[in-house]
């Protein structure tokens, strides 16, 4: 089941999972143009970008290629050029309820090393903020996001895992 909940929010920005309509497209054919097969996650722990939590053992997942900046650019008319990236993300094989309502940054998705990569309205990288915070201090990401969004040129931020470079979540300035 899908709900309309696609983001969590604070006063200046909102954290977004991959939207349900995009998830449906990715399950059919991902952003690399490939129809991927689902698998059963025997152990659990995969970071799910559809609901911003880790998978549980036994859940059906799909590892798809996802181009978050390309999707944002198509929506906004931006031209990210060479900054467009396509990488692997785990999503549920079937529709899910999406992220839990409220609560801001999804601390469950946080790992020890994350980067907040800031983009301007053109989709060009403005810079990044390296976060070296263990899971138990993940709530401190809220402060770092407020600092990034203090720059009026920042239109959106991608949270990425440093080790693998994987996209974790999108953070947009609230309108």
Image: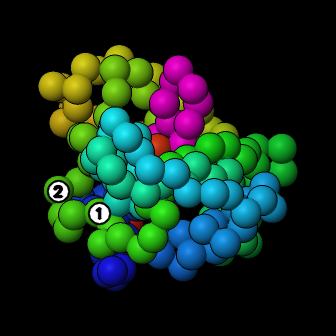
What element does badge 1 sit on? loop
Residue 56 position (above or below residue 19):
above
For the point 19% across and 36% down, which residue is it? Answer: 139
Q: Which residue is mark 1?
A: 99
In the rendered image, residue 124, in percent from the top left (x then y), is placed at 71, 46
In the rendered image, residue 54, in percent from the top left (x then y), is placed at 32, 44
The quarter of the displayed image where residue 34 is located: bottom right
Which of pointers 2 and 1 indicates the residue nearer the eye? Answer: 1
In the rendered image, residue 41, in percent from the top left (x then y), is placed at 41, 45
Residue 58 seen in render? yes
CA distance separating discs 2 and 1? 10 Å
For label 1, the crowd category at 10 Å Cα-Cα, with few meaning under 14, some 14 to 19 and many 20 or more, is: many
Nearer the observer, 151 or 64: 64
The quarter of the displayed image where residue 125 is located: top right
Disc 2 and disc 1 in contact, CB within 8 angstroms: no
For label 2, the crowd category at 10 Å Cα-Cα, with few meaning under 14, some 14 to 19 and many 20 or more, is: few
Is 72 a magenta residue?
A: no
For the point 60% across and 68% down, which residue is it? Answer: 27
Residue 42 shown left or right of residue 162 in the figure = left
Magenta-tinted stretch? 155-167
Quadrant containing the N terminus in the rendered view: bottom left
For the point 46% across and 44% down, which residue is it? Answer: 168
Q: Which residue is mark 2?
A: 103
What element does badge 2 sit on? loop
């Amino acid at each position: 089941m899908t709900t309309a909940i696609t983001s969590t929010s604070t006063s200046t920005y909102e954290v977004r999972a991959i939207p349900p309509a995009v998830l449906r497209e990715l399950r059919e054919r991902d952003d690399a143009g490939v129809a991927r097969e689902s698998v059963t996650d025997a152990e659990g722990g995969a970071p799910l970008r559809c609901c911003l939590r880790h998978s549980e053992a036994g859940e059906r997942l799909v590892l798809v290629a996802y181009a978050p900046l390309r999707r944002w650019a198509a929506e906004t008319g931006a031209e990210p050029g060479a900054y467009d990236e396509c990488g692997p993300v785990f999503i549920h094989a079937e529709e899910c309820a999406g992220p839990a309502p409220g609560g801001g940054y999804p601390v469950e998705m946080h790992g020890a090393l994350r980067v907040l990569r800031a983009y301007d309205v053109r989709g060009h990288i403005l810079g990044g903020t390296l976060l070296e915070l263990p899971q138990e201090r993940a709530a401190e990401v809220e402060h770092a996001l407020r600092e990034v969004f203090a720059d009026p040129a920042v239109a959106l931020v991608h949270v990425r895992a440093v080790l693998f470079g994987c996209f974790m979540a999108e953070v947009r300035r609230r309108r």
